[in-house]
Image (cartoon, helix red, strand yellow):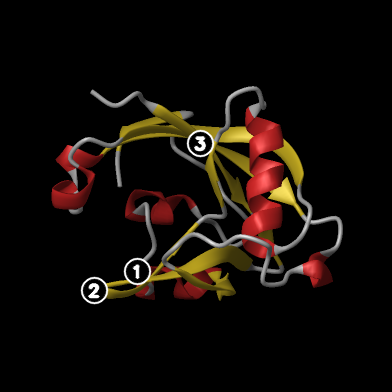
Amino acid sequence: MRPIRTAARALIVLGGKLLAIKMRDQSGVFYILPGGGQRHGETLSEGLQRECLEEIGTNVDVEELLYVREYIGKNHEFHHAHRNFHQVESVFRCSLPNPDGIGPGSEHDKKQIGVEWIPLEELDDRRFLPDVIKPFFTKDGFEPSSNYLGDVN
C-alpha cells in the first residue's frame, strides 16, 4: 500500500486570466494549476514556492488557503494508471511579485509542455483538471463553494 501524498497548488488570477500549466497526454492537451508534491521537512508553502520555481520559473507569494481536495485515482478517469494513487491537495491563492518573470522553470513535470494564461471566459472550453472547480471562477477571481471539496477530479 502506497502512502497518501500531500501536495500544494497555486491559484493565480491576474487581469481576468488564470495561470495554468499546459500538459499533454495520449488524449491531447490539458491544463492544471502549478504546484506539486510536498517533500519531507518542508511546509506546504515552502513546497509550493519550490514547485512554482520549477514549473513556472518565478517566485510566488503564497496567500490564503482556498480549498482542500482529495484525488483517489481508482475513482476517476485515469483509474488504470492511478489505481494506487491517493493525494490530498491544498490550493492556495497566490500572487506574483514579478508577473513578467514567468518562464520555462528549472524542472518540468514529464507531461508539461508549457505555461499559459487562460482567459477566465475561455476556461469552460478547455480541458482543465480538476474540472469540478470551473464553476467557482468569477469574473474577478475565485469563490469555492466549500473549503473541502472531497474526492474530485
The disc at residue 27 is 2
Q: Is residue 63 left or right of residue 3?
A: right
Distance, label 3 to label 1, CA atoms, is 21 Å
CB within 8 Å, label 2 to label 1: yes
Q: Earlier in the sequence, mark 2 or mark 1?
A: 2
Residue 18 vertical placement versus 24 (above, below): above
Q: Residues within 10 Å of mark 3 (few under 14, many from 20)?
A: many
Q: Nearer the viewer, mark 2 or mark 1?
A: 2
Q: Earlier in the sequence, mark 3 or mark 2?
A: 3
Q: Residue at x 20, y 53 (%)?
A: 78
Instruction: Pinpoint residue 40: horizontal percent, then vertical percent.
Output: 58, 25
In the rendered image, is residue 140 in sight? no
Q: Nearer the viewer, residue 19 or 103?
A: 103
Image quadrant of residue 70?
top left
In the rendered image, is residue 144 in sight? yes
Q: Amino acid at mark 2?
A: Ser
- As drawn, the residue found furthest toward the right would be 97
Instruction: Pinpoint residue 44: horizontal percent, then vertical percent.
Output: 63, 30
Instruction: Pinpoint residue 3: horizontal percent, then vertical percent.
Output: 34, 23
Q: Residue at x 41, y 66 (%)?
A: 111
Q: Residue at x 28, y 37 (%)?
A: 85
Image quadrant of residue 63?
top right
Q: Residue at x 36, y 25 (%)?
A: 4
The disc at residue 127 is 1
Q: Nearer the viewer, residue 42 or 126?
A: 42
Instruction: Pinpoint residue 94: horizontal percent, then vertical percent.
Output: 70, 47
Q: Residues within 10 Å of mark 1 (few under 14, many from 20)?
A: some
Which quadrant holds the N terminus?
A: top left
Q: Earlier in the sequence, mark 3 or mark 1?
A: 3
Q: Nearer the viewer, residue 138 or 73?
A: 73
The disc at residue 7 is 3
